[in-house]
Image: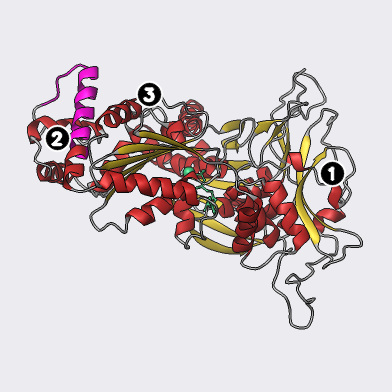
């Protein structure tokens, strides 16, 4: 779970300068803007502590990107409070400033109170405390995050390292960071590709199919390919490989759009993003500059500026009335004309050069974009376009079957491919026993293979041989096998009244007794019922069914098991010597 703590700077000073009524109104306005931002990212406001606000991301409801959501909320709050200041400054002559701290890790969450009827959404663990401490270290109007949170958001945001710091109440110092702004990378793959992608395993047939479709599209026979599969299965990776292939055609033109979970209700969101990129809008462009850019693009396509610019300018929220006559159309008509204009742009482009149109993550598409896509798909067959759409299985494509519509369902990878991903991610061979465990747990999902491998590497369980110590044919060395900090604190004390089945996810490091090969410790995230004494598991005890890095209800107990973003949180938690828990919800449903 990720915790965000936000506090006002110098609230004592405020209370001296404002009368109680003014102070109350000011604080209420501040709480309101914070709550609005937090709601947008589906955070849970746990508590208002004076003028501080404690927010959870990942509990009671979990998302795969909770750490990112927390950071976006943090930056959003800073911005929103700045906006609020113009009003407060005019009314009361004061400015508000906030500091924000964010930490990710394990907590015991859920019904903690002994008394029925008491708040049962509390989270007990290190992250709430660390978030509050980091907040105190932040400069006014800035967001400071722990190394555990950084690990989950690195690449998505540009950050400045603030150094290796001791944090009161936390036994080990950690590197902390100030978040500066979003990096522009929107997907895992954007982030990973900054460092160079490892080879793609086991998708030769799918790639060949797509490449065949591309060859046909170049020859004037356009089609649509649907790439379906669960999160982390490799939809984006496959499409990335297709893009590499397409880039070899010197005449190819790529159009990329992706839907976002944050903007499922924002009309044409993916299209707006694309247009803003294509038009090279800069944050400090004036209205005139934006209109010039829009005019320029549409003129290039030979479109009638007075009819089309207002449609696109409205879409892009650029005031155009100084240059063109206002739009005076019913909303439906305006929407359809906008779709027509966008389709015209695409078709004109495809006349000029073959197009690869990639539209990712349709499970988050907004209704207007879906409408656009449907109308585009109708026009594809006799154009030089390949339209590739990706989505999770819950999205049901509304388009009728046809020879020009091909569906690829991405399945889990086989054992050999899985092993290669582990080796590639580790950068060295993993010992057999560990390899088996990783492959078994990840169950053919590439994302899990990568994350679990990174997790065991961080715990030092795969490392290069040291001169003179390695066994022949065995590339691993024995990692530190003395009991780690978690081991020493093995009794996971139940929280007060923790008689209800809350759960703890623990990163454990244990030495398997009598291990033959290299005395390798087996790392695994273990779910342990709270209150039960934790003991180092033997290899047969690893509870495989618990290690699914996704949210899903526990079949019997109705528990929610989630790894709050990914396994990295677990390993960080381990390093920080923290008793941390998961958004485990301990209610019996029966
Ligand atoms: N076939 C594959 N071979 C190697 N790595 C893969 C493969 N498919 C996916 N990956 C890796 O797994 C991670 C998740 O893949 P991604 O394409 O983002 O999944 P999805 O888009 O289906 O959610 C990425 O880091 C990606 O590089
Ligand atoms: Mg993807």
Mark toward the viewer: 3 or 1: 3
In the image, the residue with mark 1 has its CB under 8 Å from the nearest atom of ligand 1: no
Residue 89 visible within the image: no
Residue 506 placed where, x, y %? Answer: 76, 47
Residue 126 position in % (x across, y down) = 71, 46
Q: Sequence-wise, which precedes: disc 2 or disc 1?
A: 2
Q: Is mark 3 within 8 Å of ligand 1?
A: no
* Badge number at residue 492: 1
- Please name whichever residue, 103 or 272, is drawn nearer the observer in this view of the structure: 272
Q: Badge 2 local density, few (<14 within 10 Å), some, or many (20+)?
A: many
Residue 344: within the magenta?
yes
Residue 491 at what x, y percent from top left? 88, 46
Viewer-closest of 516 and 381: 381
Q: Which residue is mark 3?
A: 400
Measure the C-alpha gap from mark 3 to mark 1.
55 Å
Mark 2 = which residue? 309
Inspect this view and state whether residue 563 appears.
yes
Q: Mark 2 to mark 3: distance in Å?
A: 33 Å
Q: Residues within 10 Å of mark 3 (few under 14, many from 20)?
A: few
Specify the quadrant of the image occupied by residue 432. bottom right
Q: Quadrant of residue 512?
A: bottom right
Q: Is residue 67 above or below residue 315?
A: below
Mark 3: which secondary structure?
A: loop
Q: Which residues are magenta?
A: 326-346
Going from the N terminus, do you reach mark 3 or mark 1 first?
3
- Quadrant where the N terminus sits is top right
Q: Disc 1 on helix, strand or loop?
A: loop
**Residue 574, above or below 54:** below
């Amino acid at each position: 779970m990720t915790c965000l703590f936000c506090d006002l700077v110098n609230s004592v000073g405020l209370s001296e300068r404002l009368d109680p009524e003014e102070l109350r109104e000011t604080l209420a306005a501040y709480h309101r803007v914070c709550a609005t931002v937090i709601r947008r990212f589906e955070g849970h406001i746990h508590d208002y502590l004076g003028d501080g606000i404690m927010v959870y991301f990942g509990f009671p409801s979990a998302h795969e990107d909770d750490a990112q959501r927390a950071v976006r909320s943090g930056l959003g709050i800073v911005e929103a409070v700045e906006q609020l200041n113009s009003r407060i400054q005019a009314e009361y002559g004061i400015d508000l400033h906030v500091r924000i701290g964010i930490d990710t890790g394990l907590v015991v969450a859920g019904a903690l109170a002994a008394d029925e009827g008491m708040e049962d959404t509390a989270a007990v663990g290190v992250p709430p405390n660390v978030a509050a401490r980091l907040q105190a270290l932040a400069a006014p109007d800035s967001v400071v995050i722990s190394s555990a949170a950084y690990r989950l958001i690195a690449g998505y945001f540009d950050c400045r390292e603030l150094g290796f710091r001791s944090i009161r109440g936390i036994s080990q110092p950690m590197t902390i960071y100030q978040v500066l702004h979003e990096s522009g990378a929107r997907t895992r793959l954007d982030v990973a590709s900054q460092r160079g992608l490892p080879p793609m395993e086991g998708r030769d047939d799918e790639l060949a199919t797509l490449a065949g479709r591309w060859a046909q599209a170049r020859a004037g026979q356009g089609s649509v390919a649907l790439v379906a599969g669960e999160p982390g299965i490799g939809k984006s990776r496959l499409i990335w490989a297709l893009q590499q292939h397409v880039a070899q055609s010197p005449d190819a033109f790529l159009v990329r759009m992706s839907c976002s979970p944050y903007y499922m209700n924002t009309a044409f969101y993916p299209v707006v993003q694309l247009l803003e990129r294509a038009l090279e809008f800069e944050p400090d462009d004036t209205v005139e500059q934006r209109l010039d850019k829009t005019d320029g693009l549409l003129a290039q396509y030979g479109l009638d500026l007075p009819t089309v610019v207002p449609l696109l300018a409205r879409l892009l929220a650029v005031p155009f009335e100084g240059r063109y006559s206002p739009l005076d159309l019913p909303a439906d008509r305006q929407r359809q004309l906008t779709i027509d204009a966008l389709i015209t742009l695409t078709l004109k482009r495809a006349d000029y050069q073959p197009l690869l149109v990639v539209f990712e993550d349709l499970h988050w598409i907004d209704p207007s974009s879906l409408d656009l896509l449907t109308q585009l798909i109708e026009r594809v067959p006799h154009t030089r376009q390949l339209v590739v759409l990706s989505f999770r299985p819950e999205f049901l494509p509304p388009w009728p079957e046809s020879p020009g519509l091909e569906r690829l369902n991405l399945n889990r990878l086989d054992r050999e491919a899985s092993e290669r991903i582990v080796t590639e991610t580790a950068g060295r061979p993993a010992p057999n026993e560990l390899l088996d465990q990783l492959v078994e747990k990840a169950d053919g999902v590439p994302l899990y293979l990568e994350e679990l491998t990174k997790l065991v590497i961080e715990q030092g369980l795969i490392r290069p041989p040291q001169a003179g110590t390695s066994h022949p044919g065995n590339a691993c060395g024995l990692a530190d096998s003395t009991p780690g900090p978690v081991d020493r604190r093995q009794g996971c004390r139940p929280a007060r009244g923790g008689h209800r089945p809350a759960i703890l996810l623990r990163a454990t490091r244990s030495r398997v007794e009598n291990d033959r090969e290299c005395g390798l410790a087996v790392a695994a995230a273990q779910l342990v019922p709270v209150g039960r004494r934790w003991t180092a598991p033997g290899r047969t005890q690893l509870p495989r069914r618990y290690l699914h890095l996704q949210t899903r209800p526990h079949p019997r107990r109705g528990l929610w098991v989630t790894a709050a973003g990914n396994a990295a949180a677990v390993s960080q938690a381990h390093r920080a010597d923290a008793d941390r828990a998961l958004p485990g919800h301990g209610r019996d449903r029966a």
